[in-house]
Image: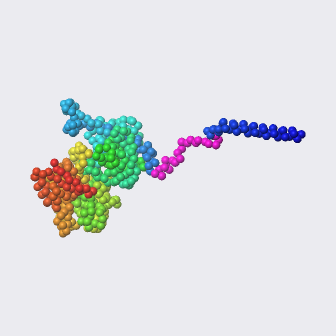
Amino acid sequence: MKKSNRYLTGILLILIGIIIGSLFAIFSFYNPVDDRADVEVTEVKHSSQPLFTDEELGKLDARFLFKQVAERVTPMVVYIEASVPFSKSDMPDDEFHDEDSFWGDIIPRRARTVGSGIVISTDGYILTNNHVIDGAEADNIEVVLNDKRTFQGRIVGQDPTTDLAVLKIDARGLPAITIGNSDEVRVGEWVLAIGNPFRLRSTVTAGIVSALSRDVQIINDQMRVESFIQTDAAINKGNSGGALVNTSGELIGVNTAIASQSGNYQGYGFAVPSNLASKVAEDIIEYGHVRRALLGVTIVSVDAEMAEMLDMDSIRGVYVSGVATGSAAAKHDIRSDDVILRVNGETVNESNQLQQKIAVLNPGAIVDLAILRDGKEMSKQVVLGMLERNEEELANRSESPPNDQDSVKPERQNFEKDNKSSQDRKKLNDVSFAEFDLGFRAMAIGEKDKSNKYKILVTDVVDGSTAARIGITEGQQILKVNNQEVEDLESLKHLIVQNSESENKLTIEIQTQSGKIKTLQFQ
């Protein structure tokens, strides 16, 4: 090839390269790459499987179990609606209008009460609160299951002393709750409250156990047992009779009450422990009533002053201020001035704790008591007796409203009122008792060698008495009457009589077991 032709060919190739390069650059500039089309490089993944399973989350935090627990337990909680007849005298005057008075006296009025219940057996036994169905007409109790099936409920039995009752519906194959051990419940444990607040069916709320063994004095019965589990899980009207469950879905309590100034949830709810509730339910189903075990003692929680008087090394246990003649305690050498420290190996530091420990046992059961006597600890085995209550007494008690604020401790019934035994026994302190016409009984504890002043403690309050109506309750210490200090039982009697006969209103200053000072006024 000629030299000139080689130059021309080279120039032509260079020009062609420039043209192709220019075209490629222009094409790239006006046609940017679309990332969405690069599926071979970037892939969006979809999956129905969570990164962590519910079981793995549950191991991280108990709160992740709430979903599973709610799904499993909600079908076991029912809605209860009952028709309760009432008269005009049962309601305040401003609840009725003049135009209603004539027809209201002829046609019985009825109120609808609503609450919750817990299915405890597959064949239709339902545990609820007594106040949900108390006084209801036999054919007007409606039970609605979670699947919206409706049944007529029949009352199997009621126990006003624990505010519990059992209903029965004609159904089979129901999902039944598993009852847990409430003795193993600890403060701070996560719990769920399931019920029907404000008619809102199947509502689930969560919280923790705030306290144990609460005595809030809401059950109006002389043989009441109150040792509630306190929780901050939201509980409102309609939750009564519903379930309080742990993160294993086990029933640990029956939601019963709230502490509130407004009547609605303010952070304090109370549930009957499951051990007591299951005992009551089983007795009702088997016998039609509760068979109550009875120790037969008068008891008071030990406080700092009493511990000092008894020369105790620490504030603990429950003080026995009296023993009923012929009771189980008397037969097995339990004495006044004893301090009960443990029941079947479990510590008791409040009187209501001791009551609850005895109430969950059956009559005839053998209970091991750890006793402190004269500074020495000893063990006593006691065969429990049975509380005898006739049908008329049971009927009268069931008619009492369940939410009265005044009541008497169960173990204080059957106390022998004469004190001959207290005079004969060896005493660490001077202890005496007296009854008052206002409807309460008190005991004086003191050491005569050191002081002429006694500590005056209320040991019993008569249900429905003047003292009960103004708020005097067991365990309170009486400090003053019309601003005059009380030194002993005789001075207390004198001051009450003296001020009752005067034109001034009678006032009594008391100190609660929590240390709060209150002034109560007699009307």
Examine the rendering and report whether any part of residue 395 can be seen.
Answer: no
Residue drawn 16% across the image and 61% down it:
487
Q: Is residue 149 left or right of residue 386?
A: right
Residue drawn 86% across the image and 40% down it:
6
Give coordinates of residue 509: x percent, y percent: 19, 55
482 or 351: nearer the eye? 482
Q: Where is 386 relative to 87, above or below?
A: below
Give coordinates of residue 513: x percent, y percent: 26, 57
Say which quarter of the image contains residue 202.
top left
26 or 460: nearer the eye? 26
Q: Main secondary structure of the magenta part?
A: loop
Residue drawn 26% across the image and 48% down it:
219
Examine the rendering and report whether any part of residue 209 can be seen.
Answer: yes
Magenta-highlighted residues: 38-61
Q: Where is 462 relative to 89, above or below?
A: below
The extreme bottom residue here reads 449
